[in-house]
């Protein structure tokens, strides 16, 4: 009989492993940061600095994962959520993200916030082949699987939204003239591009005036006056809250009564419409994809009630009128679905595969009918929105769920 | 009249010459030991930490720039984030648009900043103390907006910023990119720290400090105060600009939001904590700027700002003249032990 030595075990080992591994191949495969009991997930957010009001998102997500872990985690694995502060400064994001990947050894980066901050680490993460999942920004560049296969967006991007308005205009007011006010940066230009792409060859004849503004301008009054002079009967208003409120006031002041389309960045009742005057804001149109927590219409909705229960138990100090908490409650649900689909094959490659393989997911705090869908060529998970009209008190949703896909 | 070379250093108020014991002074031994340690570190630590140390050196260099102006010349600046940003953007634009090698961007960034700093120093001549602080503050707040300015967008990339490639080590050098960048930065740092030390030991350096200590007396001695002040502004901007270029190469990305007024404040904090008017102290400042916010965050995410404030207060309380002053004080205490008073 052959004697069993250490060496014979070693030589036999590869064969034995292959034997065991063949059936087990689909079962347990772990990337960095994953064990039988834990999945480490990294994130950067703005907890300090000028944009720290967004920190609520990170805090809500931390609370969400606490809840998830108490309920048993994902497929028996607890989520360790490590969220660092980058104070909205790109150099700090690079440092913190490298710390997450190289020192903490996280499995993936999830919902890090901000456009310049995510841009700063996009190349690094793609080089290192670390998933940059569901980034927290509405810029359109995140859905580019050809060049950045490890980066995927989440929320409806600005161009999609622009297309939704274009669809609406073509269906309802095909003979109208459009005046455009936009912020002179990538955010404003994305919206204008979406509108023009959506209008197609009618864009040239329908858009009669465009007025950019700089964030350094004190007001947009003169722009609004010029737009009125163009004789347009649709006002496409792409401004951040402060300027949106000014524009709403000014149109009423100078007696201009166009169909006012307001970008979703500024459709907060408390932040924009109240300062502009609720009466002045009547009949403005905008789009939505999340349930508005201040809308009394949802009070008997199961998703809403679950969200309130979550807030009460896991984030009692959080502000329930703040839409960020709804956003930050919904986006981790998408991550959980991806991890569930991965099963025990928790490699970074497989995570990206499953993130691009979501079908008709309906997180409860998205508006009814809006579904999360992705494919290997579609890295825009939420593309649908619903339009709403302001009735002087609150937004009334109307019409179908509209899809505004982006085609480059 | 001949002045023994050693005494000149005492003028800087920074050098513990009193401590000279043996032939190679303690100071030289310490510096040599520090350099040896700096050479070994990248081989024993994780590459992420090596990257952090590279950033420490970058901030240390930027703080040294501020130190030359504020610590040695007595001119106050809240605008060094602007010089840092100009340096970073110069490097990024040269690499992106002209495909210039990264090492050539450093002198270019320095030169551009020197000119800008010199020109800014001219009107600054008429401003003193708080008024100068205010004028430089304006420079700092204007910089991010200038970088976003529409007509400059083809060059600066607007709000999107510029992504640049990380330099690879030259072929045949068995280092990873992080280690290579660390050594590259270390070499630049040593060179620039040595020249700063030499500059301050020279006749020019004495003139610069004399202006700080007593401008009227300095002028009476025949020092062209206007020229020296503007030149110091230029040199200070040169240092900070080179740091900015190194920072851009290390981070591989520049965006307007990286160079806000808050960066100026960080540099100022680093300056005070490290030691106003101390050349090695600037490195302590870099360590503080980079690591203390991380420590504060580890203590409490929600209260990171408050914890940072408390640490800063404690540091200022324990080391009122900065890290450099503290080291000097501690060394003096050790030295005097055992000796009859």
Image (cartoon, grey):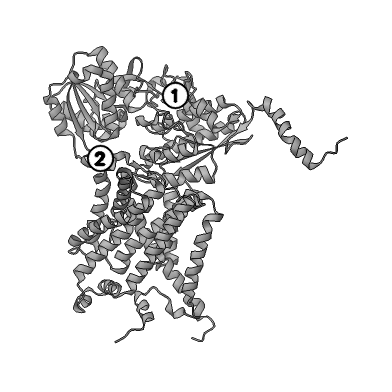
**Chain letter of disc 1?**
A
Dot 1 crowding, Cα within 10 Å, few <14, some 14–19, many 20+: many
Q: Where B20 sits versus A149, above or below?
A: below
Horizontal side of residue B215 vs A339, given as left or right = left
Is residue A390 in view from this perspective? no
Residue closest to the far front: B172
Q: Which mark is residue B153?
A: 2
Q: Is A250 rendered above or below residue B75?
A: above
Q: Are marks 1 and 2 on the same chain?
A: no
Asked whether residue B304 appears in the rendered view, the answer is: yes
**Chain label for disc 2:** B
Q: Which mark is residue A365?
A: 1
Q: Which of the labelled discs sits on residue B165, or is there none?
A: none
**Which image quadrant: the N terminus of chain B?**
bottom left
Q: Position of residue B284 (x, y in %)?
A: 43, 62
**Residue A223 versus residue A120: which sits nearer the camera?**
A120
Task: Give SS at disc 1.
Answer: loop
Describe the element under mark 2 as helix, strand or loop: helix
Percent of width and height locating residue A338? 52, 27
């Amino acid at each position: 009989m052959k004697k069993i030595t250490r060496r014979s075990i070693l030589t036999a080992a590869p064969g034995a492993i292959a034997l065991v591994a063949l059936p087990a191949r689909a079962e347990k495969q772990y990337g960095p940061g994953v064990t039988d009991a834990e999945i480490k997930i990294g994130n950067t957010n703005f907890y300090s600095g000028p944009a720290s009001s967004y920190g609520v998102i990170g805090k809500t997500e931390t609370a969400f994962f606490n809840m998830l872990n108490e309920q048993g985690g994902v497929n028996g694995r607890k989520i360790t959520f490590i969220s660092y502060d980058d104070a909205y400064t790109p150099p700090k994001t690079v440092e913190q993200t490298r710390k997450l990947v190289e020192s903490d050894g996280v499995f993936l980066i999830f919902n890090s916030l901000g456009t310049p901050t995510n841009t700063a680490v996009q190349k690094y993460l793609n080089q290192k082949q670390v998933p940059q999942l569901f980034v927290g920004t509405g810029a359109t560049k995140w859905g580019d699987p050809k060049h950045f296969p490890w980066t995927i967006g989440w929320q409806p991007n600005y161009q999609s939204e622009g297309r939704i308005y274009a669809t609406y205009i073509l269906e309802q007011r095909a003979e109208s003239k459009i005046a455009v006010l936009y912020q002179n940066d990538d955010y404003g230009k994305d919206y204008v591009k979406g509108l023009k792409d959506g209008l197609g060859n009618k864009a040239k004849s329908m858009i009669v005036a465009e007025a950019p503004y700089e964030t350094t301008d004190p007001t947009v009054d003169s722009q609004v006056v010029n737009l009125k002079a163009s004789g347009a009967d649709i006002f496409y208003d792409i401004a951040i809250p402060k300027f949106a409120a000014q524009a709403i006031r000014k149109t009423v002041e100078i007696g201009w009564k166009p169909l006012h389309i307001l970008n979703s960045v500024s459709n907060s009742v408390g932040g924009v419409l109240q300062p502009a005057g609720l009466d002045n804001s009547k009949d403005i149109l905008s789009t939505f994809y999340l349930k508005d927590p201040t809308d009394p219409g949802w009070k008997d909705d199961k998703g809403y009630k679950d969200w309130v229960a979550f807030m009460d138990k896991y984030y009692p100090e959080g502000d329930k009128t703040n839409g960020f908490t709804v956003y930050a409650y919904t986006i981790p649900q998408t991550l959980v679905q991806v991890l569930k689909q991965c099963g025990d094959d928790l490699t970074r490659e497989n995570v990206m595969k499953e993130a691009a393989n979501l079908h008709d997911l309906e997180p409860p705090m998205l508006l009814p009918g809006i579904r999360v869908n992705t494919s290997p060529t579609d890295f825009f998970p939420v593309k649908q929105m619903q339009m709403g009209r302001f009735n002087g008190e609150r937004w009334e949703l109307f019409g179908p769920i509209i899809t505004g896909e982006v085609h480059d | 009249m001949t002045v023994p070379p050693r005494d000149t250093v005492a003028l800087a108020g920074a050098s513990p010459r009193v401590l000279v014991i043996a032939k190679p002074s303690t100071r030289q031994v310490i510096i040599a030991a520090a350099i040896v340690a700096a050479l070994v570190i990248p081989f024993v630590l994780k590459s992420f930490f090596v990257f952090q140390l590279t950033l420490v050196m970058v901030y240390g260099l930027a703080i040294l720039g501020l130190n030359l102006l504020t610590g040695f010349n007595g001119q106050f600046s809240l605008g060094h984030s602007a010089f840092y940003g100009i340096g970073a953007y110069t490097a990024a634009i040269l690499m992106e648009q002209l495909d210039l090698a990264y090492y050539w961007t450093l002198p270019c960034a320095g030169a551009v900043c020197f000119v800008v700093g010199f020109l800014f120093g001219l009107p600054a001549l008429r401003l003193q103390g708080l008024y100068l602080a205010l004028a430089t503050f304006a420079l700092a707040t204007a910089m991010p907006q200038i970088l976003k300015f529409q007509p400059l967008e083809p060059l600066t990339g607007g709000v999107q910023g510029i992504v640049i490639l990380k330099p690879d080590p030259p072929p045949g050098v068995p280092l990873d990119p992080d280690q290579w960048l660390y050594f590259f930065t270390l070499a630049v740092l040593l060179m620039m720290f040595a020249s700063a030390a030499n500059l301050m030991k020279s006749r020019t350096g004495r003139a610069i400090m004399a202006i700080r200590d007593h401008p009227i007396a300095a002028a009476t001695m025949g020092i062209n105060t206007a020229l020296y002040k503007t030149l110091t502004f230029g040199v200070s901007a040169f240092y900070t600009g080179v740091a900015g270029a190194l920072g851009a190469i290390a981070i591989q990305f520049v965006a307007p939001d990286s160079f806000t007024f808050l960066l100026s404040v960080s540099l100022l904090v680093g300056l005070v904590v490290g030691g106003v008017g101390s050349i090695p102290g600037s490195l302590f400042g870099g360590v503080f700027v980079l690591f203390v916010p991380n420590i504060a965050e580890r203590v409490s995410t929600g209260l990171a700002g408050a914890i940072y404030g408390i640490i800063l207060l404690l540091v200022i309380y324990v080391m009122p003249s900065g890290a450099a002053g503290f080291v000097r004080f501690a060394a003096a205490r050790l030295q005097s032990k055992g000796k009859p008073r």
